[in-house]
Amino acid sequence: MTLQDGDFIDVDWYGPGGESVNCVLLLHGLTGSSSSLYILGQQQALAARGWQSVAVNWRGCSGEPNHRARGYHSGASEDLADVVNQLTLRYPNKLFAAVGYSLGGNVLLKYLGEEGSNTPLKAAAAVSVPFRLDHCADRISKGFSRIYQARFLRDLRQYVEHKQQAFVRQGRREELERLAALETLQGMKTFWDFDGRVTAPL
């Protein structure tokens, strides 16, 4: 799906077809994708009940780097708003709901707060949401949780590096310069480091 700023988001459909079949948007968490086991399992469970689902891959999470230097993050509710608007315009006879997991839950709740009663979604659920990102960023840097933090940071660093390589191949000079202007990706040890060096500047 082409977004308003010219970037794209890939979505993966599953389940029974038909213009009037109810559909659930599934929103993955940090460094996840439509291939994450919890997304695949939810799609199978929905299909068994006769529901269609569409798994949304946040920018650059489908295996293909996105076209812009900016990526996805917990506050990127405008991307979800764009997807919801496009889907409901394209399929006006469908009832849409959404389920967000972790970061995807943050994005969903932020979107619902911004849209209020204007949202075309008929139902929504947020699962395992880090409501206070600051507290979660502090907690994951302690004890056994540091193992998860290290994995997340490795995946996030690779996310940016793959994007840089793609921009070189595609000749996207302006976007490449935006990434080059960031601080080094090396030596990041916490989510605060990544947010300060990458997310906030972009």
Image (cartoon, helix red, strand yellow):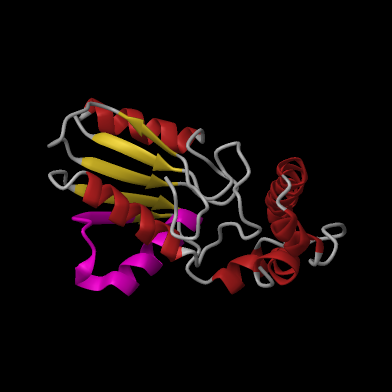
Image quadrant occupied by the C terminus: bottom right
Residue 110 position within the rendered picture, expressed as x and y whole percent measured from the top left = 39, 68
Left or right for 25, reference 172: left
Residue 188 position within the rendered picture, expressed as x and y whole percent measured from the top left = 81, 61
Q: How many marks?
A: 0
Please state the extent of the stretch shown in magenta in the rendering: 103-125
Front residue (pair 154, 176): 176
128 relative to 168, above or below: below
96 relative to 140, above or below: above
Residue 87 position within the rendered picture, expressed as x and y whole percent measured from the top left = 28, 48
Front residue (pair 141, 188): 188
Q: Quadrant of residue 136?
A: bottom right
Q: Visible in this render: residue 108?
A: yes
Which secondary structure class fits the magenta region best? helix
Front residue (pair 137, 75): 75
The structure residue drawn at horizontal position 46% and vertical position 60%, both measured from the top left corner, is: 129
Residue 42 position within the rendered picture, expressed as x and y whole percent measured from the top left = 36, 35
The structure residue drawn at horizontal position 61% and vertical position 50%, both measured from the top left corner, is: 67
- Say whether residue 110 is magenta: yes
Left or right for 147, reference 125: right
32 relative to 146, above or below: above
Q: Visible in this render: residue 102?
A: no
Image quadrant occupied by the N terminus: top left
Left or right for 148, reference 131: right
